[in-house]
Every structure is written in C-alpha cells, then in structure tokens.
Amino acid sequence: MLVSKTDYILYRECPKNTWMKVHQPDIYYAEELSSFEKHIIETGNEVEAEARKIFDDGILIEGRGEEAQKMTEKLLAEKKATLFQPVFIKDGFMAAVDILKYDADTDSYRIYEIKASNEADKNRHYYDLAFQVNLLRRCGLNVAVASIMHLNPEYVRSGALDLNELFKSDDITAEINALQEEVAAEMEQAKAYLAAEAEPAGPCCCIYKGRSNHCTTFSHSNGHVPKYGVHDITRIGLSKKKLKALIDSEVFHLHEVPDDFELSDAQRNQVDAYKMDTVLMHKGQIGEELEKLAYPLYFIDYETFPSAIPLFDGFSPYQQIPFQFSLYTQDAPGGELKHSEFLYEQQADPSGAFAAAMQEMIGPKGSVIVWSKKFECTINKQIAERVPEAKAFLDDVNARVYDLMDAFSKQHYVHKDFKGSTSIKKVLPVMAPELSYKELAIREGGAAASSWIKLVGTALTPPEKEKLKEDMLAYCKMDTWAMVRILQELEKVIK
C-alpha cells in the first residue's frame, strides 16, 4: 500500500475517513461529486496548466504508474531542467510533484506546489509541500528551495495575461524545513494507521466539528449522530468549546440541549424553536423592517461566475463576472408584478450590457430588494469601476437596496425548519412550500455559474444551447420569485 500526499493531507483532517477511502472505497465514493466540487477540480487543473506556461522548458510526465516512474528516473538522470508531474515513490509513500526545477549551478532542486487560491494555507498547503520535500529527500534529491505558487489577488488583467504578475511564488523553504521532523513522524503514523486491516473502532474525529466540516464517511462512522442535531447549530463549528462540551456530555439531539447551556441568541433561538416546535416571531420588528420599503419595488437577483483566471480586462482572480439577472417590479401595494430578465450570451465582458439593462429596467425611485445585499452591492461597485458611465446609477441603486434576509438574520422570524440558516433555499420551503427548486434542471448557484461558461462556449449544439439558456433563466427567475413570495408572507404576518 502506498500513502499518497493526498492521503496524508486527508489523514491529517480525519484519519478514519482516510482509512475508509483506502479500504472501503465503495462507501467513501458513494456520493457523486456536486457541481461545486467538480468545478473546484476543473479550476485546479486550469490554474496548473496556466502556471506551467511560465516554464518554457518543462516536460510533462503523464500518469502515475510504472511508466511514469521510469520516465521520471530517466529525465532526472539526464538532468532535465524542468519537470511537470514527476512521480516519486519511496518507503511506502508516493507523490507527483507539480513542478520540479533543476539548478545545474548548485546541483540542487526547487520544488513548486501550485494552488488555485489567492493565498497559501499554512494548515494545509504547507504540510502538502512538506510531505513532498520529505519524500524527495528520501529519494536522494537535494531540495534547496520549496515554493508555493498561487494566484495574485492584486493582479488586474489589462490586455494579454501577464503570467508573471498573475502568479505569486512564495519561498517558504525555512518553514518547510522547520516542519520536516513533525511531518516525517506523521507520515509514519499515517502509514501504520492505514495499513490496519480492521476498521478503526469508534467515531471519527469529525464528531467535534460542525456539520459543514464533516468528512465524506461521517454518517458511516458516527451512526448514532442524528442527521439534524447539535452539529447543525448555527456557527457551532466556530464554538469548539461549546460543541465539545455537548458531545462529551453525549448530547447529540437538539431537544437534549440544556436550557441553561450557554449559546448565542441565534443559537438559542434555533434550539428553542426546535424544542418548542413553534415559530419565534416578533411582529413589531418585522413591521419596522417592512416600513423601510418604498414603492415601486424591484426584486432582483444576480448570477455571476468567479473565474480563477481573469477572462477579461479589469478583472482579478476569482472576481465575479456578472452575466445574468432576473427582476420583478411592483409599482404599488397589491399591484401587478412584471417580470424582466437579462442573460449575456457572448464570450466577452458582460459588465456594460449588464449595467445598461439594469438602467433600462430600474427606475429612479423605489426600493431594490435583494437577498444578502453585501453580494449585489459589491458587484455593483465593481461594475461601476469597469463602466464609469454607469457609476452614478449603480451608486444610487446601492443606496436604495433593501436586504430581505434582514428579517431572518436579525432573528425576527425563526422557524425550526430553517435549521439555523437564513439561506433563501432554507427559508423558501417554509414560507412558500408550493415552490421548489427540485423541479428545476439547475438547482443551486454553483451549477448556474458554471452553466454560463458552457453557454458562451462552442461545444453545444443550437438545441442544447437553447435548453441550457431556458434552464438558466428558470433558475434565476425562481430566486427572484422566491423573494416576492417571502415578502408576501411576511406582510400577512403583520396584518
């Protein structure tokens, strides 16, 4: 059995989950990757491909098997300057290195680990690189410099991509050398743990983490933990002492949480709403919120694409590209709701057309209603930087934005089925149960974002493109209609 660098990093996060990956892959891989997870993998591959272009003498080694190993040995013996994905195996450990560069003057090597992020993560990326350096040194290589290459968040594209500005290379040799003893010990521990034939007994270490940080096989290893319980208390993963106290007291169900257990207001409301099976509602405060609205009302929702590699001038790594919006307009209380929409279908920067369409559809007076206004307001500010002629209009829109989520994030309305969340996907089924995203082909933002790249590409046939366009419009329209219906239900509450 070989322990790869991926196995090692996974082991550091949850040993038992890694054991399941090695010995019971059918359980580990039981669930299909989400659109978001697939997008992360695709983004990583895209960023690595761009980073390689900086090295014009690089030789790519394909695969991980015996052929790749032999090719690595051959090219190392020939002292080739730069290798992409060379494969190293020694003492039961295996790694494929992103970039390995030979320095003939010092007869030493520089190793680069490429990360599709705007900064290096000391808790993950450093240990990833330290594993590789440890292995290469075991193989007899003189690794003199260890670097992490990542995207530069301050880079703004202007014309052709400047790869030397797009990427930053952090020399962290000293930090990696300081980790070598610790990492070497962990590598041996991981190898011994993963070599065991019998499944490790008891729960996995994720029992002390919030739900969003649970491992792939959590439900298998922690069968006594309910699907909805204390691990789902809002922000409990950031309150490690609280969660540990509950788990150590064998409190897993929300109804078991003591009434005098210290929780934040939002956490206590979530638990109490569940235990009492009632809606916690403050009609007066909801009324105060809704009094802030001025007609006409403009309900608007954006769809954006966060491209790691800036596609157009004026964009930085991961800066959102706004390509679509849906808009419902209501001129007076109880008045007709009119729907408008915008979807950019060209392979170019949508910013100008996006702003122009908004300006055509949104009048100079009235509230602009969104869900989580920080996002839309930030997008508007960024569009204004790229489209100066639209700045006055977009600044005015931002001044009129009302965040419909406030009624829920401020704890004026708490329902047990929100499960501690103020996401529109959690609020909508409670407030307007007749609506559902399950009937849509596109059901979440990640899929909507990646759909735009497919739409403006050339791989789709005309019928496929038309179907995708319909699906994208339907998803964005649902997000906007959801706000309309939620407001309607809040208005019923205060009557």
Image (cartoon, helix red, strand yellow):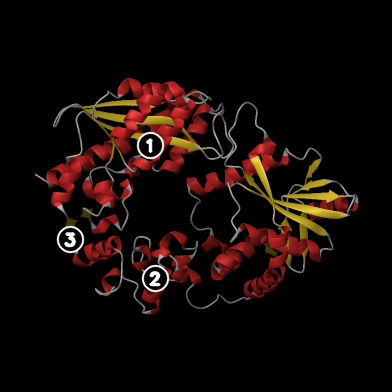
Given this view, does label 1 or label 2 mark the residue nearer the observer?
Answer: 1
Mark nearer the viewer, 1 or 3: 1
Question: Which residue lies under the disc numbered 2?
Answer: 243
Answer yes or no: is residue 464 visible.
no
Left or right: residue 251 compared with residue 488: right
Residue at left 52%, top 32%? 454
* SS assignment at label 2: helix
The image quadrant where one finds the N terminus is bottom right
Asked if disc 3 and disc 2 are in contact, CB closer than 8 Å, the reply is: no
From the image, tell me which residue sits under label 1: 377
For label 3, the SS is: loop
Who is closer to the viewer here, 331 or 1? 331
Tell me which numbered mark, 3 or 2, is placed earlier along the sequence.
Answer: 2
User: Reading the chain from its start, which is encountered first: label 1 or label 2?
Assistant: 2
Q: Find disc 3 in the rendering and name its residue.
A: 278
The spot of residue 483 in percent (x, y) is 26, 39
Q: Residue at x 15, y 45 (%)?
A: 287
State the image coordinates of residue 332 (x, y, percent, origin top left). Answer: 15, 28
Image location of residue 488, percent across then percent down: 18, 40
Q: Amino acid at mark 2?
A: Leu
The percent coordinates of residue 263 (x first, y second) are 31, 68
Q: Considering depth in this image, is 435 or 389 the residue closer to the camera?
A: 389
Q: CA distance from mark 1 to mark 2?
A: 35 Å
* Amino acid type shown at disc 1: Cys
Q: Within 10 Å of the Cα at label 1, are there few (<14), some (14-19), or many (20+) other Cα atoms?
A: some
Could you tell whether 163 is left or right of 449 in the image? right
